[in-house]
Image: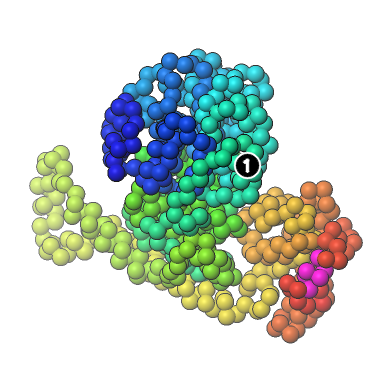
């Protein structure tokens, strides 16, 4: 099937041809005929990231637009600024030969006055993040009463980001007789609630298995010690000289730290996260789209806004708490029919989550060894040789060559090649000459680790904050970093229970943690933190408390008796340890 077979307007087909698109993707083949047909119903499209959902709703929307009407006819809601900007840019390309179509991108971090002025001048398609659109609505500067088409793009992520109330408010400002199209990678209960409350008998189209991974992506993982995580990342980057990749981190702090380290070590890398200004984010994304930036270090929120083709690798510096997030991260590569590689950097304790990921993506993950120094040097050397072989001689060098030939005439061809490669390649040779085998270190660490105890070099803490207090692993990590001043990559494993949690930090930071958390509170609840030792029968020796800090009271406060029973079941004997 070609786009010609979809019966779209000639102006749209001409724009598609200019863009070089020939065959529609599966979601486009199934969605477009339904959306442009007379009397069609509301629509739910479930498809993985990178399958062409923007064109699936954008092309039929443009096909149905009244180009003479300057009122707001269509609204597309997007979870992030980056994705909204990307959608608006694609729609403008598709509408190249439809002069009556005016697309306005509405998002935070940019001048709201400029956006309101653009709406007032006759924008008839609005691509918006929920928060900024609601702000403009409350100012009375946009009228949604004539909206004919409403698109909820990446609806699951909008709900994950806390836009539920904003979506409800926006939808109440739109007419009941509009057509609503919902596109999502997953269909959690909250998304179904929106479909039920705001859509009328929607047609549902599912592309592939829900939550499954892209078959064009090869999933791999390496296992190293926590302290070797950054070194493993560098080795992976060095092993793939032509990488054009994304590195995902859990927090903004960790993202900036990793990017800063890479830049300091000579890599062409930048960070992308919410603490950057909109101008900074736009500049970073522009460089990445133009391939002048080789490595982008990003938070998970940015994953939904990065729509760049030819990404060769996605690397998970730390595995996300939510396995669905792993799927969304990985979906940034292997797009448009191309292949890609997703690599997770795990510690021995993280390895248990491989099965969870495999169940989610319906694919097997391949364990690979961290590249050895010799392998990296060989790969880099061959890459350099290939680049030299492909390089055309510059005509401007002709006048300088006779002197060069004279100075080098006493060397054989073999000697010249050796000298040249040594000159260009000495940095790698020196760096990896006595490089440690990271895979052996991880195995040694795994063998040394005591059951249920902390990783070697780490201290394990008890914290009286759990899921019932509104905590999750991400919020606990942020709390610990903000309160203690520790960097996110210094914090080891976090185990979240209903009424309490356990976390690990390097032994050297033990006193800092205790003093910093003393008299602190989490979401209004007084924090109590304690240091534990493993029991004798777990190989650690000893019992009882060593140090404690907090506001007094039972460490099970807030969890109730049910939490104590739950702790007995999940972590048998731990109460005796303290």
Give 295 or 506, whichever is nearer the viewer. 295
Kind of element beneath mark 1: helix
Hey, which quadrant is residue 567 in on the image?
bottom right
Residue 57 image position (x, y, % from top left): 45, 36
In this rendering, the answer to whether 208 lies above or below 279 is below
Q: Give the range drawn in magenta.
A: 563-568
Q: How many badges with numbers are in the image?
A: 1
Residue 292 image position (x, y, % from top left): 36, 42
Whether residue 287 is visible here, answered yes or no, is no
Tag 1: Cα neighbours inside 10 Å, few (<14), some, or many (≥20)? few
Residue at the image point whose x is 57% and y is 77% from the top: 446
Give 326 or 292, whichever is nearer the viewer. 326
Name, please, the residue furthest toward the front. 39
Whether residue 53 is visible here, answered yes or no, is yes
Residue at the image point whose x is 22% and y is 61% from the top: 419
In this rendering, the answer to whether 110 lies above or below 267 is above
- Residue corresponding to mark 1: 196
| Applied colour scheme | rainbow
446 within the magenta span: no
566 within the magenta span: yes
Q: Quadrant of the C terminus?
A: bottom right
The answer to whether 570 appears left or right of 418 in the picture is: right
Residue 398 image position (x, y, % from top left): 11, 42
Q: In which quarter of the image is the N terminus?
A: top left
In this rendering, the answer to whether 220 lies above or below 84 is below
The answer to whether 178 appears left or right of 547 in the picture is: left
Residue 109 image position (x, y, % from top left): 57, 30
Residue at the image point whose x is 81% and y is 70% from the top: 565
Magenta-drawn stretch, dominant element (helix, strand or loop): helix
Give 424 or 213, whichever is nearer the viewer. 213
């Amino acid at each position: 099937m070609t786009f010609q077979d979809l019966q779209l307007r000639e102006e749209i087909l001409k724009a598609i041809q200019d863009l070089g698109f020939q065959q529609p993707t599966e979601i486009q083949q199934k969605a477009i005929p339904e959306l442009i047909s007379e009397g069609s119903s509301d629509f739910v499209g479930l498809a993985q990231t990178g399958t062409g959902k923007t064109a699936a709703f954008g092309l039929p929307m443009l096909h149905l637009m009244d180009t003479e009407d300057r009122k707001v006819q269509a609204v597309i809601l997007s979870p992030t600024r980056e994705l909204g900007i990307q959608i608006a840019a694609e729609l403008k390309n598709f509408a190249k030969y439809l002069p009556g179509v005016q697309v306005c991108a509405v998002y935070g971090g940019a001048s709201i006055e400029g956006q309101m002025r653009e709406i007032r001048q006759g924008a008839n398609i609005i691509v918006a993040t929920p928060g900024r659109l609601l702000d403009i609505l409350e100012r009375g500067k946009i009228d949604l009463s004539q909206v004919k088409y409403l698109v909820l793009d990446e609806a699951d992520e909008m709900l994950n980001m806390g836009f539920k109330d904003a979506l409800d408010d926006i939808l109440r400002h739109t007419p009941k007789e509009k057509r609503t199209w919902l596109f999502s990678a997953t269909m959690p209960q909250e998304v179904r609630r929106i479909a039920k409350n705001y859509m009328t008998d929607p047609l549902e189209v599912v592309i592939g298995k829900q939550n499954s991974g892209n078959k064009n992506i090869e999933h791999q993982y390496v296992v190293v010690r926590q302290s070797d995580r950054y070194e493993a990342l560098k080795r992976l980057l060095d092993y793939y000289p032509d990488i054009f990749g994304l590195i995902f981190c859990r927090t903004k702090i960790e993202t900036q730290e990793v990017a800063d380290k890479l830049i300091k070590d000579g890599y062409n890398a930048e960070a992308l996260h919410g603490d950057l200004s909109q101008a900074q984010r736009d500049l970073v994304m522009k460089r990445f789209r133009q391939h002048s930036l080789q490595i982008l270090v990003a938070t998970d929120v940015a994953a939904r806004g990065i729509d760049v083709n030819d990404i060769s690798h996605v690397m998970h510096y730390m595995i996300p708490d939510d396995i669905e997030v792993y799927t969304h991260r990985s979906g940034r590569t292997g797009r448009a029919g191309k292949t890609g590689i997703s690599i997770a950097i795990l510690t021995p304790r993280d390895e248990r989550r491989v099965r969870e990921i495999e169940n989610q993506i319906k694919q097997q993950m391949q364990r690979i060894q961290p590249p050895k120094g010799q392998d990296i040097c060989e790969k880099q050397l061959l890459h350099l040789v290939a680049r030299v072989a492909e390089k055309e001689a510059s005509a401007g060098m002709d006048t300088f060559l006779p002197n060069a030939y004279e100075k080098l005439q006493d060397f054989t061809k073999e000697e010249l090649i050796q000298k040249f490669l040594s000159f260009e390649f000495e940095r790698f040779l020196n760096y990896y000459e006595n490089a440690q085998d990271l895979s052996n270190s991880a195995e040694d660490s795994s063998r040394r680790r005591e059951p249920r105890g902390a990783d070697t070099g780490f201290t394990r803490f008890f914290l009286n904050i759990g899921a019932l207090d509104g905590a999750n692993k991400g919020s606990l990590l942020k709390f610990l970093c903000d309160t203690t001043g520790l960097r996110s990559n210094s914090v080891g494993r976090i185990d979240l229970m209903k009424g309490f949690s356990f976390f690990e930090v390097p032994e050297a930071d033990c006193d800092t943690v205790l003093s910093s958390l003393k008299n602190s509170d989490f979401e209004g609840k007084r924090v109590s933190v304690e240091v534990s030792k493993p029991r004798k029968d777990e190989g650690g020796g000893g019992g009882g408390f060593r140090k404690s800090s907090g506001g007094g009271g039972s460490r099970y406060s807030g969890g109730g008796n049910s939490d104590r029973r739950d702790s007995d079941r999940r972590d048998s004997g731990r109460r005796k340890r303290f």
